[in-house]
Image (cartoon, grey):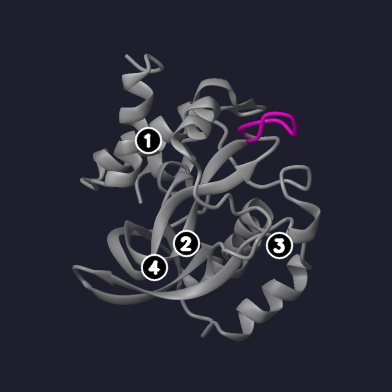
Amino acid sequence: MTSHDRHARPGPVSHPTLLDVHPLALRDPQLLLEQTLRQWDGGDLWVFGYASLIWNPEVEHIERRMARVLGYHRALRMWSRINRGTPEVPGLVFALMPGGSCQGVVFRVPAPLARRELDRLWQREMPTGVYDPRWLPCRTHQGLVRALGFTLSRTSPNYTGELPEPRLLEILRSAKGRYGTTLEYVHRTQESLLSHGIRDRRVEAVLMLARRHGLLG
């Protein structure tokens, strides 16, 4: 890992907070952590990033690899009522949803640092218990690794379902939270994906919609 990887903080990102999450989606983060730890072999910790974790992992790592996960895809289908929107005008963030496949990045945290960094990661991603943490088989050029990923169930109250284009466009035009707009978040994710050589047609389609309506240059 370079010094830039270790110390750079590219700016705030959208992590779920208590106010961001629908009350019915709240679960005990500690119980979910204990369950996750029981399924971990205690060696190096691999973490799969599919959106903001790619451009701001915030975990100390010694290696990163391009990776693909089968059975899940990146989708702008999670409500954000504080970080990228408000309760009155909810915004959106990406989630790892069942079905298809997803290209992203895996980060390797060495075993001596793994538990400390996992606790930090849990505070970032799981303060509300909104996600379903899973150990995912990730295909890399150097072989298969088992990495922790944060997925979202379609039964979650924070899952948006299929949004009609006019509704999505209005969100892109209007939703803004404490960390900025939904549109900025999508654009930043797209830039990061492209910098890693990843093309995601769903993300591109969202930004094409924004450009067609004059929201992006």
Magenta range: 84-90
Under circle 1, the secondary element is helix
Above or below for 185 versus 56: above
Residues tagged 2 and 4 counted as in contact (Cβ below 8 A)? yes
Residue 216 appears at what percent x and percent y?
36, 18
| Residue pictured at 33% horizontal, 45% vertical | 202
Which residue does the numbered mark 2 point to in the structure image? Answer: 97
Work out which quarter of the rendered image holds the C terminus and state it: top left
Residue 3 appears at what percent x and percent y?
39, 42
Residue 165 appears at what percent x and percent y?
44, 35
Marks 3/2: CA–CA distance: 16 Å
Which residue does the numbered mark 1 point to in the structure image? Answer: 206
Which residue does the numbered mark 4 point to in the structure image? Answer: 99
| Mark toward the start of the polypeptide (3 vs 2) | 2
Marks 2/1: CA–CA distance: 17 Å
Which sits in the foreground, 5 or 106?
106
| Residue pictured at 41% horizontal, 17% vertical | 215
Residue 83 can be seen, yes or no: yes
Which quadrant of the structure image shows residue 191?
Answer: top left
Residues tagged 3 and 4 counted as in contact (Cβ below 8 A)? no
Under circle 4, the secondary element is strand
Which quadrant of the structure image shows residue 87?
Answer: top right
Q: Which mark is residue 170?
A: none
Marks 2/4: CA–CA distance: 6 Å
Which residue does the numbered mark 3 point to in the structure image? Answer: 129
Label 3 environment density (alpha carbons within 10 Å; few <14, some 14–19, many ≥20)? many
- Amino acid found under the numbered disc labelled 4: Gly
| Residue pictured at 62% horizontal, 44% vertical | 79
- Amino acid found under the numbered disc labelled 3: Gly
